[in-house]
Image (spheres, rainbow, N blue to C red):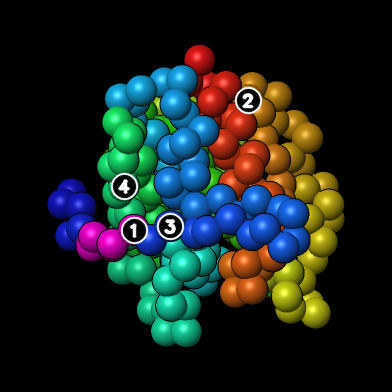
Amino acid sequence: MVAPPLKFLVPVVVEESRSSGTECLGLLSILRKLKSAPDQEVRILLLGLDNAGKTTLLKQLASEDITHITPTQGFNIKSVQAQGFKLNVWDIGGQRKIRPYWRNYFENTDILIYVIDSADRKRFEETGQELAELVDEEKLSGVPVLIFANKQDLLTAAPAAEIAEGLNLHTIRDRVWQIQSCSALTGEGVSDGMNWVCRNVNAKKK
């Protein structure tokens, strides 16, 4: 199989929010957390079903325009180099025909971010099966997993706790994991999830 062509995105830093007292972490902020591990590459894999909101989430992290999002046919990669660090965030399309390509990018992953459309209850079983298969992948063994329960801005969205119970996340015992309510559209909850990523990338790199 030939992987779809790369699409490179220009990185933009998300500034810290001083007024709210909460830290809005952008890509370079993650790098600053890794000063104890110079010249190390950080590889973040961003997966989930089609229409879960992965690309919107990636653009939200980079403070890019999210008004016009098209389905990712191949994958987007945001690559940042600064202060001796290199961070790659891979956003891979979630359509059924693309999912077999996911395994091409498992190797050397430091953090797996899995995005779920919390309002699309009809696909909870499907997304749960895909997540379970990812957790069972040998190349992703022990990799910390952040599950973003996305689209919490919609009235029909299931709470993160309900999704966690429905997907039996409590059975994941071979790694650290976290489920985080968020809205990629409004940015709510995204910084909390990225804070978790920072802590667990640090722990894995030590």
The span shown in magenta is 7-11
Q: Is residue 129 above or below residue 82?
A: below
- Bin the neighbour count of mark 4 within 10 Å (Cα to Cα): few under 14, some 14-19, many 20 and up: many
Indicate the amino acid at tag 3: Val
Marks 1/2 in contact by CB < 8 Å: the verdict is: no
Q: Earlier in the sequence, mark 4 or mark 3?
A: 3
Circle nearer the viewer, 3 or 2: 3
Q: Amino acid at mark 1?
A: Pro
Q: Quadrant of residue 8?
A: bottom left
84 within the magenta span: no
- Pick out the residue farthest to the front: 18
Depth check, front residue: 45 or 8: 8
- Residue 18 coordinates in the image, percent (x, y): 67, 58
| Disc 4 element | strand
Q: Which residue is mark 1?
A: 11
Identify the element where label 3 is drawn: loop
The residue sitting at 80% across, 79% down in the picture is 155
- Residue 49 can be seen, yes or no: no
Is label 4 or label 3 in front?
A: 3
For mark 3, what is the residue? 13
Dot 2 falls on a residue whose secondary structure is loop
- Look at the image and tell me whether residue 178 can be seen: yes
The residue shown at (67%, 35%) is 177
